[in-house]
Amino acid sequence: MMDNDALVEAFLDTLWLERGASDNTLGAYRSDLTAWRRWLADQAETGAGTVPLLSVAPQQVQAFCDSRRESHALRSTARMLSALRRFYRWALAEGMIEADPLHEVRLPRVIPSLPGTLDEEEVERLLEAPDLDTPIGLRDRTMLEVLYGAGLRISELVNLSVDALNLRQGVVRVTGKGDRERLVPLGEEACDWLSRWLSVGRPAMMADQTRPALFPGRHDKAMTRQTFWHRIRRHAVTAAISKPLSPHTLRHAFATHLLNHGANLRVVQLLLGHRDLSTTQIYTHVAQARLERLHAEHHPRG
């Protein structure tokens, strides 16, 4: 029987091979399984004995949930239990265990909430924050315009290559989660900034123009998502935006503003690259609010 380390790696290999899981997804699963193993090890030190991952009982899973109740957010525990459930279902399918220890454990019910976002005036202030007198400022402005104009994840944005663009058609080819590709329209504003960046800014920043990175960081290589997230926060300070921001703030603003201006939820799902509509449904109440406003404005009984 494989030891715990080998089990985790075999599971992650399966996610990568069969599901096309991204590095970020694999890292999240590894982190959750490490926390689970650490908790089991702590229990062993208190007299419960050494517990391999494949020998846990449902009672231990319940005790684990109870131990997190006061120190962790409900959403965090729900995500971790989801990772454990996937791991043990894989082990069951592989014939490594005879029963799933999470079979009768209910995942905590988390009511989805709309992530924090910016209104349209705040987005305009953020877009205008970079200093356009410098190549770096032009790069940042262009990246913000593409991020908001196409609703990309930051990881998708920083990994764009020059050949992913088709400015004549006004689209960009994006590689999202699970290495799934999608074509996303850019809009005139983003295309204009990209044209300016490619003709003026990028040549000034890149010594080797044959490198593929659309938005270079240091040494002509693609920027990391952590670096650009840091840049966003700096520009938010310049724009006097005091709201809490997340790496997905402009992505959420993209979806929210589309719905506010009449877009269909299914269209937003396709643009965001969500495999399942349920993921997009955190924005349902935005669409509902718009419908209620339209009803009040136009219905004779409104």
Image (spheres, grey):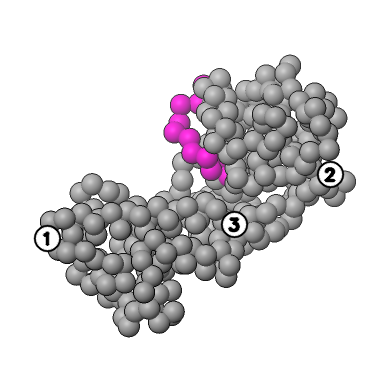
Tell me which numbered mark, 2 or 1, is placed earlier along the sequence.
1
Report the span colored magenta: 240-251
The N terminus: image quadrant: bottom left
Q: Which mark is residue 4?
A: none
- Measuring from the top left, give residue 202's x and y in whole percent: 79, 29
Residue under the image location 34 percent in, 79 percent down: 97
Q: Cα distance, mark 3 to mark 2?
A: 24 Å
Q: Is residue 179 left or right of residue 240?
A: right
Tell me which numbered mark, 1 or 3, is placed earlier along the sequence.
1
Question: Foreground mark, 3 or 2?
Answer: 3
Q: Cα distance, mark 2 to mark 1?
A: 65 Å
Q: Residues within 10 Å of mark 2 (few under 14, many from 20)?
A: some
Q: Main secondary structure of the magenta part?
A: loop
Residue 121 vertical placement versus 276 (above, below): above
Name which residue type carries label 2.
Leu
Tell me whether the residue at label 2 lies in contact with that at label 1, contact meaning CB atoms closer than 8 angstroms.
no
Q: Is residue 77 left or right of residue 259?
A: left
Q: Which residue is mark 3?
A: 177
Name which residue type carries label 1.
Gly
- Measuring from the top left, give residue 224's x and y in whole percent: 60, 37
Q: Residues within 10 Å of mark 1 (few under 14, many from 20)?
A: few
Q: Is residue 119 left or right of residue 171?
A: left
Q: Which mark is residue 47?
A: 1
**Quarter of the rendering containing residue 3:** bottom left
